[in-house]
Amino acid sequence: MNKALTATEYNFPGQVGVYHGKVRDVYNMGDKLIMVATDRISAFDVILPKGIPFKGQMLNQIASKFLDATTDICPNWKLATPDPMVTIGVMCEGFPVEMIVRGYLCGSAWRAYKSGVREICGVHLPEGMKENQKFPEPIITPTTKAEIGEHDQDISKEEILAKGLATPEEYALLEKYTLELFKRGTEIAAERGLILVDTKYEFGKHNGQIYLMDEIHTPDSSRYFYSEGYEERFLKGEPQKQLSKEFVREWLMENGFQGKEGQQVPEMTDEIVTNISERYIELYEHITGEKFVRETTEDISARIEKNVNDYLKACQ
């Protein structure tokens, strides 16, 4: 298996800055961004000590496909994908919130609900719901966008407006885009025998217009169930067969880690790393309907540098 690419430190011609996120390294070119999807993996807002081979390639290619498939709903930042692990796009001024949309009660929302919480981000939840139950209509539960080492915090529409993080007109458009994108993602997933359970979107402004940014409908930003057997498992109260990063969180929790102070990340053996990689490939092939082509190379970093530089030269 390929060696994971977990760190990059390029200096592209015209580069004015770089930001290393939890998973992506973003190179500021002034009028555009070069986003490298590394093989890093995070959970509970913590970057895990080992990378997952091919993960960056999978995330970047899934996001690229969905960005292309949703341009009729809203404009997005993508200009080109010169390398399997790279997307180049227009510079946007991001809103400091993530728009999370949920079609089903599960994950962190279910954990909160089970503890007695009946309101998330200002959204009231009905009594008597069960784990993995479908909401009557999708709900939007935004969070703040955390810096590295910090945790995202739930935030309501009212708080977003009160803090001036978006104007009422901007937020109305963010909600509209979020629900329409989720509807499109749900339809595409259904064609592949999957249920898009929940996901998150990030938006920014470019030349005064709201753009969709970053990734979309990837296993890092989304949760999928298999359609087949969903109803039967739900009625029996059994866990759903799912494709998402939740299995990584569950493995961490089973080994006593939830990102809290003083907790140690469990050992990531080669077997664990390989299993995670194969699960990501499984999702890629299901959601795209295409066989995953493993981009193997001796030096991933050098390949990326060459492909990006070739693209930049061609744009001159």
Image: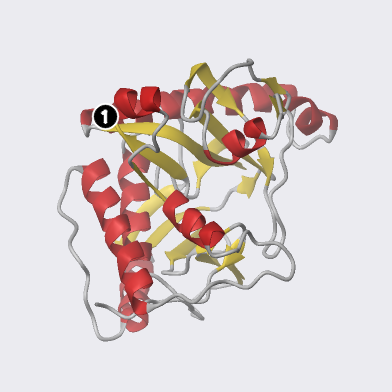
| Left-right relation of 73 to 266 | left
Q: Nearer the viewer, residue 141 or 133?
A: 133
- Observer able to see residue 72: no
Q: Image height check: is 119 above or below 303?
A: above
| Left-right relation of 155 to 98 | right
Q: Image height check: is 118 above or below 57?
A: above
Measured as percent of width and height from the top left, residue 18 is found at 59, 71
Of the 4 image quadrants, the one containing the C terminus is: bottom left
Which quadrant of the view contains residue 159? top right
Q: Residue at x 34, y 83 (%)?
A: 302
Q: Nearer the viewer, residue 316 or 181?
A: 181
Q: How was this image coloured?
A: secondary structure
Q: Image height check: is 306 above or below 25?
A: below
Q: Residue at x 48, y 38 (%)?
A: 199
* Disc 1 residue crowd, few under 14, some 14–19, many 20+, Cα 10 Å: few
The residue lying furthest to the left in this view is 291
Measured as percent of width and height from the top left, residue 105 is found at 53, 29
Which quadrant of the view contains residue 269? bottom left
Q: Image height check: is 279 above or below 298?
A: above
Q: Residue at x 44, y 42 (%)?
A: 222
Measured as percent of width and height from the top left, residue 113 is found at 64, 30
- Secondary structure at badge 1 equals loop
The residue lying furthest to the bottom in this view is 298
| Left-right relation of 42 to 275 | right
- Observer able to see residue 8: yes
Where does label 1 land, which residue? 229
User: Which amino acid type corresponds to the residue marked 1 in the rendered image?
Assistant: Gly
The residue lying furthest to the right in this view is 162
Measured as percent of width and height from the top left, residue 121 is found at 71, 30
